[in-house]
Amino acid sequence: MKCAPLVVLCLALFTARIAASATPSPTPLKVASVNEIAEAYVKLVLAMGEYDPDYVDAYYGPPEWRKHEKKPLDVIAAEATRLGERLAKISQPTDDMERLRRQYLTKQLSALEARVRILKGERLKFDEESRALYDAVAPTFPDSHFQEILSTLEPKLPGKGPLLQRYENWRRAFVIPKDRLDRVFQLAIKACRERTLEHIKLPPSENFSVEYVTNKPWGAYNWYKGNYRSVIQVNTDLPVYMDRAIDLAAHEGYPGHHVYNALLEKNLMRDRGWVEFSVYALFSPQSLIAEGTANFGRDVVFTKPERLAFEKEVLWPAAGLDPSRAEEFYEVQDLVKKLGYATNEAARRYVNGEISANEAAVWLQKYALMDEKRAKQSTKFIEKYRSYVINYNLGEDMVRSYVEKHGGTSDQPEQRWRQSEQLLASPRLPDDIR
């Protein structure tokens, strides 16, 4: 009887050992590769497009990736967070481009999660939103900053009445007639393309078409279609002035959005197989680089003297306008462009709930020299895109500072082109160019 408990105990131990050997040990969670995370990121961006029609600005990856069950927003956010955590566990690379790629995916995933929170109703202040989505915060300017600029314009526009009215009366002489708009725009595109190709090698099949549209909150838009092709839409709701010809040709085309997207597709998606560059999430840090390089591209493709000479010789005659007034026109317009951050201030106050949309439009008329129609169009843009506005002016300033810091000053045009191309063809984000 005394041996019975011992036998039972031995049998129990023997049975436990057999059971333990039959049950496999827990397998450590596999650390995903960067490529796996990149593919999952693309699919999450596409899933976001089900809720936010503006979110997927461009996609040219596998068509079958678009076919998926609709994910709840909470699941999208959780997966974005999980992907970021898995990415952080992968050992850091020594290659600079791989490092930039890792930072790119980290920031893009963080912005995606923030966009989910916004879609679910979380109300962020203007600066909080721009930091979360675009990884940048624009400087704040008081009304007095813009008033000082307006004061410098006063003697340039003599006459009776408010400054805004005098400005509008003066610049009517510089509107491109609608029946000449396409001709002028095509000439500007041709010149920008030729000058860009002298410095940047583009895929032989690259091209884009131009469409003229109405009833849009923006002045122009590049819809990148993949395979190095774009559709550029120009909004003709409002008069198009002479400076917009090269501005739009450079910003939307060469060396702006079209070139940026084509180089990312060629150098990163196709040559390196980085699938995350088959999709462009609009509300993300990538947009600050995209808009900043597009705006800065106007000064890369033409120096000021080159632009003035070309416009006087080609564009102004094509528009049927007097080229002898070109210097006068740009003397005023250069001052007006210094009011660019006024749009940010109107957007900041509107997003923060300090002013209404109507009050924002009135403020833009006063401090940005926008007529009523243009101010209302700008306000519609702010209502729709909110803190996105920082990507234009702050983005341009950051890109300019980065390029010039690396030797691409206005008196070193070749280096300016080299630095700009490097920025256009790499996964750099705001944090990489500060």
Image (spheres, rainbow, N blue to C red):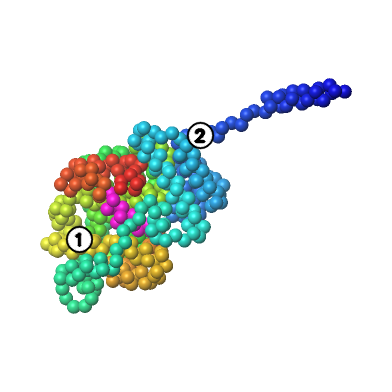
Percent across and percent down for residue 64 are 50, 41
Percent across and percent down for residue 419 are 25, 42
Percent across and percent down for residue 183 are 24, 56
Residues drawn in magenta: 386-399
Check residue 31 in the rendering and tell me which mark sits there, or answer none: 2
The secondary structure that most of the magenta stretch takes on is: helix
The verdict on residue 302 being magenta is: no
Residue depicted at 77% across the width and 23% down the height: 10
Is residue 209 among the parts visible in the rendering? no
Q: The residue tagged with tag 1: helix, strand or loop?
A: helix
Closer to the chain start, of discs 2 and 1, is: 2
The amino acid sitting under disc 2 is Val
Left or right: residue 13 compared with residue 347: right
Q: Which of these two is toward me, 391 or 174?
A: 391
The image quarter in which residue 4 lies: top right
Query: In front of the other: label 2 or label 1?
Result: 2
Residue depicted at 48% across the width and 50% down the height: 113
The image quarter in which residue 332 lies: bottom left
Residue depicted at 15% across the width and 73% down the height: 158
The verdict on residue 394 being magenta is: yes
Farthest left residue?
A: 324
Q: Which of these two is toward me, 197 or 431?
A: 431
Query: Could you give the CA–CA distance between mark 2 and mark 1, rounded to whole angstroms?
Result: 53 Å
Check residue 334 in the rendering and tell me which mark sits there, or answer none: 1
